[in-house]
Image: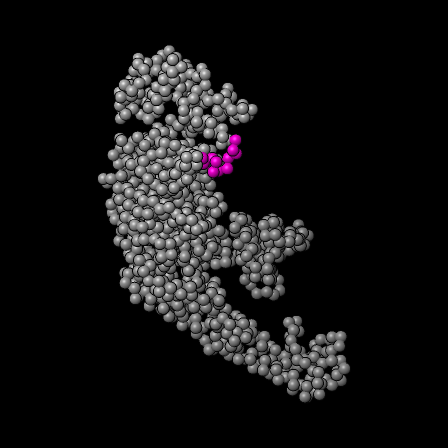
Amino acid sequence: MKVTPARRQYLQIKSQYPDAILLYQVGDFYETFDEDARIAARELQIVLTARNYGEERVPLAGIPMHALENYVGKLIQRGYKVAICDQVGEVGHGVVDRAVTRILTAGTLSEPNLLPARQNNYLVAIASSRQQTGLAVVDVSTGEFSVTWFAPAELPAALEAELQRLAPSECLVAEGTSRDAYRFPSQTVTITPCPPHFFDVEAARARLCRHFGVQSLDAYGCAGAPQAIAAAGAIIAYLEKMNTALLSLLTGLHSYQTTSYMVLDAHTQRNLDILQGSRSGTTQGSLLGVLDRTLTPMGARYLRRMLTQPLLDLTLLNARLESVEELYESPALRSRIAACLQGLGDLERCAGRVRQGTATLREVQGLRNYLEVIPRLRELLQGCQSPLLQEIASELDDCPQVRDLIARALVSEGQTDDGAEHGRLIRAGFHPELDALIASIRDSRLWMARLEPQERERTGIKSLKVGYNKVFGYYIEVSKANRHLVPPDYERRQTLTNAERYITPELKEHEARILNAEERIEELERSIYADVLRQLGLSYGQIMTTASAVARIDALLSLAEVAAHYGYVRPVLEQGHVLDIVGGRHPVVERSLDGDVFIPNDTHLDGDEGERILLLTGPNMAGKSTYLRQVALITLLAQIGSFVPARSARIGLVDRIFTRVGAEDDIASGKSTFMLEMEETAAILHHATRHSLIVLDEIGRGTSTYDGLAIARAVVEHLHSVIGARTLFATHYHELAAMANELPHLRVYTMAISESEEGEIVFLHRVTPGCIGRSYGVHVARLAGMPPSIIRRAQEVLKALEVGQHAPGQVAGVALVTGALPISAAAKAEPSLSGANGHRSDSESEGQTGAVAERRTTAAASTQGQGLALTYAWQSEEGRRLASLLEQQEADDALLDQIDICAITPLDALNLLFLMQRQRHRQRKAL
């Protein structure tokens, strides 16, 4: 098939980028062809048409140049890679030269309109070996470039936590790596396989040294981390392929260790709703949503980093707290600083656009306006007492050379001088050749303006007009009625219905002068503007230092504003293991109460000599989970240098916060709620230290009662006696309360309730010492809107269980036996509520005491006649001994006096009480 030259050029370029949507410039449009056109039409909702190229009819869809960013953003959001092919040659005869100038992917965007202003857009690369895993991180819009690495023992938890913190939009991996090899916080992250040579350690080392112009990477702190080097080198190689202009923004490489900050694993970040509310999927309902009162985009991004990288250095923390306190105590100072920050835009990304040479005139003038605010901000901070605020002031550079160059070289937005009149970029007086060309145009246009009255007077044609159009240029128009008055030096150019258009040699000469000058001006201005951007880019490092300082003061001001507005206090931080909070409040929940009062609670833990484990019991919906999260969030806030929602707080530094709260299945991985619970708990027990804070909610609820209780007890004992970490442990196993008699550093608390004579309960949401032996589940079911018939039946069942009611002929067993209760008519009519042979279904019995009791009943029936000591799987010798005594004597006070409470387990005690109750019941019937 015969192919046209234009079609051949397209196919040749497209063959080099088969995995990208190729946007191909044709005049004022970007066109897509073939399958790209079908994809673009479907994803962008634009018209799909077709055009003949020789003998071939080709599908076609196009977008206007001015709307490029909007459409590109939509394609990238849908996971596509986009290659921009621009016209790079002169438009004339033949096919215009074209070349791909940049490739846009989710992680390589630097256009502000395509990026979320208040969070970073990270591209990451992961390189792995048996000895080490390296992670490199870059935000090309701000120039942030960092690496870290992990030992095998830290995986996968540490890598997963860092990916959760970063929330990258794109990840580079070696070809052949499965998407499931790493766990990302979002399924929308783009996984980009790269050639193996991208990750070759020595090639990556050479690539990095070449980029930074150094002989070794010793100064960057990663010379001894080969996989970190491989990951960073892969990013450089990828950017070289995608858009080389972005490399100019990477002026340094920062190495860090995640253990230098408080460790927040992925589960904790999600469970505490630090950056994102679990219900909203946005910052609403999150800790960030409460704290973020920042006034600049870079301040918002810095606050996010503060929240996910709490400090462990007491000196740095006290410096932050001191600065927040000074701002907190001076509303006037906060107001003046806020006025300055409101005049600042995104210095980081604006500077990056300048450095790349892609900034618009508006962006450059914006940069100048931002820098003009800096002297006033610096003056305010220099007057502060806090060393940190004074340090920030010293880093604020208003870059006078940048401001001066912009003022001298570029036209101001809205300017009405000759530059603005002609749509110019360069200010008059900056470039002599440009000034001469503009003067030439001005002279020729003045001559044009005088031409019309002169020619009317010379020819006597009163209706004569001088005009211009894009096709014929300048002309003199005469009506046909006055053709006889046209002088001989007029040369006919165009004939209209009622008029003729002419030119003269002088008119043609001035027209050529104007057109040539305008073409030269356009070319010269582009060159001058690019050179101005290049000169401004030389101050990129200074501008970025200033931007970083602005981000820090913005974040600190936000913390001070929140503290003043919501009544937070400065915490006292120390190196010990104390956790003493008076009147603590949940920072997020209290903001969602819509006028209701949040009930504050105290927390007193001491990992050294006092209470190490707070065991929290109480009814469902009483506020246990809120209290647990509250303590963790207050600790987190203290270690970012924030004031905290409490009357007072004294906190020993925490190296890690672990949380195991909530319940969710991982269906995609084939893992049940209980399996996930056990995996998370195991990770905590492996990685927690004495300096950690551990928050556990309802461990063991996903399995049978005995198994769950056994696991919960074993976990508590390990935390108490082996790890020794400060721990808050909420449980529905009230039997665990007896551990307070065995474990000296464990104390039992409960969520207080108020119960009326009619049985109505009110949750007081107050943590008090002691234990409540009921869960009040039926009351919660009523509050949840369960049908009244279900509530009534549940109350019948509960009452029967509590008083030990049994069906006639019941076999031996504990009180909570499925067959021991009369079945309601409704239940009999609905066999689907029970499993085969009258047993409960797995889903119904899982985690319920009845399931265990059912198994024990079966076991008891099969061992009748063997004696009570053998009928039950007694957990303690004391239980077995008392069962033997019960066979020999009546269940009286004398037997009760022989019970050694410290030697019997709660479950054995429960079984023994049942047997004694049954024996007395039979004795009463015999009488």
Q: Nearer the viewer, residue 398 or 311?
A: 311
Measuring from the top left, give residue 735's x and y in whole percent. 34, 29
Q: Nearer the viewer, residue 324 or 491?
A: 324
Residue drawn at the location 74% of the way across and 86% of the way down: 485
Query: In this view, which residue lies farthest toward the top?
Result: 865
Is 57 above or below relative to 609? Answer: below
Is 122 above or below relative to 409? Answer: above
Residue 16, visible in the rendered structure: no
Q: Nearer the viewer, residue 208 or 533?
A: 533
Residue drawn at the location 26% of the way across and 21% of the way down: 897
Measuring from the top left, give residue 313's x and y in whole percent. 28, 51
Residue drawn at the location 59% of the way across and 60% of the way down: 64
Prevailing secondary structure of the magenta residues: helix
Measuring from the top left, give residue 700's x and y in whole percent. 38, 32
Residue 336, visible in the rendered structure: yes
733 with respect to 278 (left or right) = left
Residue drawn at the location 40% of the way across and 42% of the way down: 271
Magenta stretch, residue numbers:
779-789
Measuring from the top left, give residue 208's x and y in whole percent. 37, 53
**Residue 482 is inside the magenta segment:** no
648 with respect to 784 (left or right) = left
Colour convention = one colour
Image mark count: 0
Question: Quadrant of the rendered structure where residue 531 is?
Answer: bottom left
